[in-house]
Amino acid sequence: MSTFIYFLCLSLLTSVSKSMIDSTSLYLSPTILFPDYQNMLISFKIYIYTPPNALSFSSPTESNFFTCLQNSPFVTQNPEEAHLYFVPFSSNLSTRSVARFIRDLRMEFPYWNRTLGADHFYVSCAGLGYESDRNLVELKKNSVQISCFPTTEGRFVPHKDITFPPHAQGNRTAKYLGFVRYNEVKESNLVNELRKDSDFLIESEPSNGMTLVGRLGSSVFCLFEYGADVSGIGEALRFGCVPVMVMDRPMQDLPLMDVIGWQKIAIFVGSRGGVKEVKRVLDRTCKDDECAGRRRLGVVASQHFVWNHMPQPYDSFHMVMYQLWLRRHAIRYARREFV
């Protein structure tokens, strides 16, 4: 994206912010978000290290993010003025090769050793596990990991790491209580139970977009089982279908957790109580007026779940960048010797 186009978009931010300010209850800190976001656009600088090999990513989200980053004004060729440093490596790169890459950065540049990697970030959709190698320990413990949602258990550090918003592809009459778009090979017990309840529509992914829009528009709730396909969250929000996140443990890796109040746009329920418990929670937590409020805020939130080829204000790319901006004040760990 050219600098001219970028700052043309920047000039539109005032009008965009005014339209969003009416729904500020969606955001955790609206009085901070909007001015801080604009400050980020002007000030934020990132230095990209040269990757060890030609990059290859396992998901379109990773690839799209890297392309947008490369073409953005955030990138600087002067590492001395950078707030954060991006460590690029392919999704299929072995842990040994990643460790070697970090070792080379440590020897060639002074920036890693200043913070032991705390002002660095990397992209890994699957997330990195814990290894014994010094370089991998520092990368996992200190650097910001951007991964895909939902994350693999044990490969996400709350309050440090962040997740990409899923790559998402008015008046309404609700025909179904809940819609579940299920395309996993192995169905869960809850999905099998929901299939027998006429209040819920259970099917594999519709063959065309208009069918999906019709399903979303005719359902009060859209159920997403944690660990299954969650790519439709953005679309559900956009078309007024309240997301219901089904999981049996606290959710600490939701996209944009630093920015939006998920409790205001989604409902959380466990799976162990079956359909009866799901219905009880939905009836208790989402009366008519409350559901209308969730849908209204959900439509506002949906703009943050859009991945554009040419980034637009407040879209997924910029909201990921904003979360990185919030983490730019790196913790400088004391040096220690590794045996």
Image (cartoon, rainbow, N blue to C red):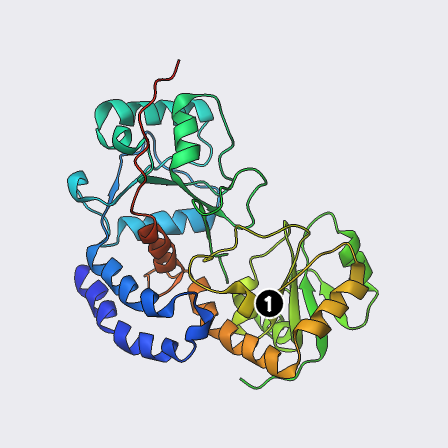
Q: Give the secondary structure at mark 1.
A: loop
Residue 127 in the image, given as x and y percentages of width and height: 49, 39
Is residue 201 found left or right of 205 in the rendered image? right
Q: In this view, which residue lies farthest toward the right?
A: 196
Residue 174 in the image, given as x and y percentages of width and height: 67, 81
Number of numbered callouts drawn: 1
**What residue sits right under mark 1 in the picture?**
208
**Image quarter of residue 199:** bottom right
**Image quarter of residue 112:** top left
Closer to us: 139 or 28:
28
Residue at 26% in and 75% down: 14
Q: In this view, which residue lies farthest toward the front?
A: 334
Residue 236 in the image, given as x and y percentages of width and height: 57, 68
Residue 329 in the image, given as x and y percentages of width and height: 29, 46
Tell me if residue 29 comes above or below residue 174 in the rendering.
above
Residue at 74% in and 47% down: 186
Q: In this view, which residue lies farthest toward the bottom?
A: 171
Is residue 36 found left or right of 263 in the rendered image? left
